[in-house]
């Protein structure tokens, strides 16, 4: 299969008069003989997926292969939908310790105007590494302050950041002030670099005040538009960029961690009438019923962390996803990283080792994030009409020892080489 | 760490982990598990008997002698206790950054047996660590090898059989790249370049050689038939004493490095002065010089894939451990972290995808290989009769991403038991929910 892809790439490249790093989209591709795990619906043994113009045209056991289709023999392989990383810094951070390469934290505390996409380095060395591990889409988010800015949802393929964008603005990132003080890792404030705990009530009031001001601002603007006698309000950047949040077109992603803070954040969301998803929620299991009642999904942070509160148990980070899932809270996994964003599937597997149903773990890196980010009509599972974001593996996609044999994004066979393989190949030449 | 937190966490875990076997200590029979010996193949549905802390029998249908605790490991995987070749846990201090050369600063003097990171290690199947001096100095200090015997005093954690090791460091940390020079503040510490780093190590080695010669001359004269009447011994220098031990082969070097050039030049220094480099630490460019390392019999103690956190780690590739192992380099995967230490088995498993190692080869990176690096492979690192009873039991094959450590045993004593931990957590929760009797209104 790889050989075929390579030859195709060469021919397509020569025909176009240059050699692209990635292959051109074949109009029709038929992936034949794979075990298909659509994530939504039953698994299909020995099935076929027909891709036309980047979308899944048909899939199943008995599928007619259109004439002229490029046939990919996937016998012995398993086809999964591409995985979605629900919170990461891909493209915003190259070398975390070198400030010149880090663009995910703007200075100041109130930054609804900044957009991750506008700084996204599409040629980041980390993106092809994630892609080669079966991750085809990612929510790239700014962090820090109180309102960190707008995240973007991208596919991990494209020659420019705009080509990659699925949603230029996916969520507004808010780091919720931490009320609970002096208890383990939560004591310092809203996540890392957050505000001091004793400031929390003031900061929540500040947030509410900003939202109120933005509403009044819009009211004044609307009024002036209707009645020329009324004055326009003075331009206010924060109020301008909070409008999509207030009218419900842009969901907020609230970083919140301790149980009391989660409750306060739920109240905040209710009072402000926001469309919300939470990030982190390490003590979510303690208030799972509240989360379920509020119908707020949770993006799980990296499992490469110690429990923020020791007496929650040594395995608290690992079992929280399973407990939330059992309580009926929708969860999705994230890498919360750039350099090890490729490890997304292993966070899901770790949660499965500590109680999360394996099928739910898989859904939490595919269809659930698509649902949470409002793109489940076009991605997140292998279904007719959806984008052909497909990963071919030689085993369970969440397993470390599984090899990724092919990745398609929008029906395009992706180049699986990356900085790791390039350096390895270079030094293998020493013999 | 906050003392109260420590106590709270300890109280949560202590019952499970600190519970001494009710039966005689050091005696244990683990039955019906899949035994991954690492060095002697796999035994399906096997038993392993530990008596007085030593593995006495591995096989099938072993009967429990009287007074020996029996653990059923049906459906589980039994492996040698995991060994972390490079960490800084269980220490009350790691760096002495005020000077560049500090070989007298021995971490053995600051072992902290109360560090809850020991519990974290145990919860990930880790039974032994090489806990090290930090990387702030070109020549740091001596390191120690400890068993994770939680609840015992510091001196009982030490592994006397282990090689004596001395920490060296090269590159960005020792040239203090991340330090901001403040006007009017302390002047920059020499060295500030990789040139200076090599030069200062050479200078100290030359000094040590001269120091040794001085003592040799003194001892020779003192031992002669007619020692001079006014013979005065040389001044004792604690720094030079440590370096003398290194040059006499009584210690080996463990050297933190990143770039291939600095590693190769450190190897030249070692050749020049005749000391043994046991391992390079982190060594993110080691794949570029795998042949040189294999030829010089220098090991690697590295991350699986934690990279790109600073400039000199920008060319670290996840294939390195597997690639170098296949080239004949003795490789171990280390944690260098009190968090990562509990998922070393996950990191080892990554070398199957990146590097194409077999399950056994991958598992070796956190068991027998670090044991060899620490000079303790005769006593631990694999499951063999005669070795010490350091064992971990997993729910699935430890190289699977779905693996979870369920039991950790040191010298035949249970130090971590997840089943018991869960039971006690449940009991505690029930107790907390039960209506309180009496008390103040």
Image (tube, rainbow, N blue to C red):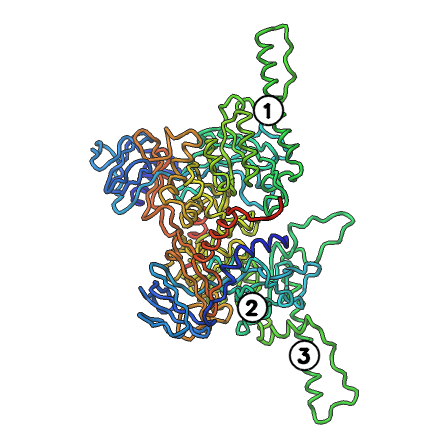
Mark 2 Cα within 10 Å, few/some/many (few <14, many 20+)? many
Q: Please tell me whether mark 3 sits on a helix, a strand or a loop.
A: helix
Residue A429 at least partly seen: no
Mark closer to the observer (2, 3): 2
Q: Position of residue B315 (x, y in %)?
A: 51, 51
Q: Is residue B208 left or right of residue A346?
A: right
Q: Is residue A225 above or below residue A95?
A: above
Q: Is residue B175 above or below residue B61?
A: above
Callout 2: chain: B
Q: CA distance from mark 1 to mark 3?
A: 77 Å
Q: Is residue B339 left or right of residue A26?
A: right
Q: Residue at x 24, y 42 (%)?
A: A45
Viewer-nearest residue: B317 or A344: A344
- Find out whether the residues at labels 1 and 3 contact each other: C-beta distance under 8 Å: no
Residue A110 at least partly seen: yes
> Would you identify the image quadrant in which residue B216 lies?
bottom right
Q: CA distance from mark 2 to mark 3?
A: 36 Å
Mark closer to the observer (1, 3): 1
**Dot label at residue B213:** 3
């Amino acid at each position: 299969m790889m050989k075929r892809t390579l030859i195709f790439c060469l021919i397509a490249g020569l025909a176009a008069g240059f050699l692209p790093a990635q292959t051109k989209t074949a109009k029709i591709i038929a992936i034949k003989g794979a075990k298909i795990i659509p994530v939504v619906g039953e698994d299909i043994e020995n099935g076929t997926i027909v891709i036309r113009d980047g979308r899944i045209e048909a899939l199943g056991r008995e599928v007619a292969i259109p004439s002229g289709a490029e046939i990919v023999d996937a016998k012995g392989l398993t086809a999964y939908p591409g995985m979605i990383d629900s919170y990461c810094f891909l493209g915003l951070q190259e070398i975390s310790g070198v400030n010149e390469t880090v663009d995910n934290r703007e200075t100041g505390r109130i930054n609804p105007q900044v957009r991750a996409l506008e700084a996204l380095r599409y040629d980041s060395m980390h993106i092809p590494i994630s892609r080669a591990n079966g991750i085809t889409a990612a929510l790239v988010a700014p962090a820090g302050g109180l309102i960190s800015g707008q995240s973007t949802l991208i596919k991990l393929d494209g020659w420019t950041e705009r080509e990659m964008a699925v949603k230029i603005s996916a969520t507004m990132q808010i780091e919720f002030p931490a009320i609970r003080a002096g208890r383990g890792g939560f004591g310092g404030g809203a996540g890392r670099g957050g505000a001091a705990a004793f400031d929390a009530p003031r900061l929540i009031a500040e947030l509410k005040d900003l939202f109120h001001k933005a509403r009044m601002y819009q009211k004044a603007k609307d009024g002036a538009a209707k009645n020329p006698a009324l004055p326009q309000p003075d331009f206010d950047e924060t109020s301008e960029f909070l409008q999509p949040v207030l009218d419900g077109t842009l969901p907020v992603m609230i970083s919140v961690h301790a149980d009391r803070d989660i409750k306060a954040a739920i109240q905040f969301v209710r009072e402000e009438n926001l469309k919300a998803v939470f990030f982190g929620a390490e003590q979510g299991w303690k208030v799972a019923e509240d989360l379920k009642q509020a119908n707020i999904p949770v993006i799980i942070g990296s499992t490469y962390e110690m429990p923020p509160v020791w007496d929650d148990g040594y395995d608290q980070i690992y079992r929280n996803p399973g407990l939330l899932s059992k309580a009926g809270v929708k969860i999705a996994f994230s890498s919360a990283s750039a350099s090890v964003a490729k490890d997304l599937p292993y966070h899901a597997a770790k949660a499965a080792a500590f109680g999360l149903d394996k099928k739910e773990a898989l859904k939490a890196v595919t269809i659930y994030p698509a649902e949470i980010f409002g793109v489940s009509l076009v991605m997140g599972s292998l279904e007719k009409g959806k984008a052909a974001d497909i990963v071919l593996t030689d085993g369970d996609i969440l397993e470390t020892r599984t090899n990724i044999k092919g990745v398609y994004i929008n029906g395009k066979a992706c180049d699986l080489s990356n900085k790791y393989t390039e350096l390895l190949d270079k030094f293998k030449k020493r013999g | 760490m906050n003392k109260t937190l420590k106590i709270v966490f300890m109280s949560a875990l202590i019952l499970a982990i600190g519970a001494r076997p009710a039966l005689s200590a050091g005696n244990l029979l683990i039955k019906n598990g899949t035994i991954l010996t690492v060095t002697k193949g796999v035994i399906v549905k096997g038993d392993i008997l530990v008596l007085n802390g030593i593995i006495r029998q591995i096989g099938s249908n072993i009967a429990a002698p009287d007074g020996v605790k029996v653990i059923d490991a049906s459906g589980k995987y039994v492996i040698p206790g995991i060994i972390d070749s490079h960490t800084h846990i269980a220490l009350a201090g790691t760096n002495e950054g005020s000077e560049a050369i500090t070989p007298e600063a021995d971490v053995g003097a600051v072992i902290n047996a109360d560090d809850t990171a020991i519990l974290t290690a145990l919860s990930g199947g880790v039974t032994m660590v090489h806990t090290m001096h930090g990387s702030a100095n070109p020549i740091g200090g001596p390191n120690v090898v400890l068993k994770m015997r939680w609840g015992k005093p510091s001196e009982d954690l030490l592994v006397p059989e282990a090689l004596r090791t001395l920490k060296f460091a090269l590159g960005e940390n020792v040239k203090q790249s991340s330090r901001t020079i403040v006007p009017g503040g302390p002047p920059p510490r020499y060295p500030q370049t990789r040139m200076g780093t090599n030069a200062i190590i050479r200078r100290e080695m030359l000094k040590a050689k001269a120091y040794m010669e001085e003592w040799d001359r003194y001892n020779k004269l003192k031992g002669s038939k007619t020692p001079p009447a006014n013979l005065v011994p040389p001044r004792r220098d604690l720094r030079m004493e440590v370096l003398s031990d290194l040059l006499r082969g009584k210690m080996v070097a463990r050297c933190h490095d990143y770039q291939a050039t600095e590693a190769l030049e450190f190897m030249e220094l070692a050749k020049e002065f005749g000391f043994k480099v046991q391992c390079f630490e982190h060594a993110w460019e080691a794949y570029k010089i795998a042949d040189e390392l294999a030829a010089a019999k220098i090991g690697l103690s590295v991350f699986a894939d934690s990279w790109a956190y600073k400039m000199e780690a920008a060319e670290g590739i996840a294939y390195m451990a597997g690639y170098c192992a296949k080239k004949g380099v003795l490789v171990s995967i280390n944690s260098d972290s009190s968090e990562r230490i509990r998922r070393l088995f996950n990191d080892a498993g990554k070398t199957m995808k990146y590097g194409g190692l077999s399950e056994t080869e991958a598992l070796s990176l956190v068991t027998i290989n670090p044991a060899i690096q620490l000079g303790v492979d005769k006593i631990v690192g694999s499951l063999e009769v005669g070795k010490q009873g350091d064992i971990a039991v997993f729910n699935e094959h430890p190289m699977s991403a779905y693996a979870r450590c369920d039991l950790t045993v040191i010298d035949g004593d249970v130090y971590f038991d997840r089943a018991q931990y869960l039971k006690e957590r449940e009991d505690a929760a029930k107790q907390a929910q039960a209506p309180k009797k009496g008390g103040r209104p």
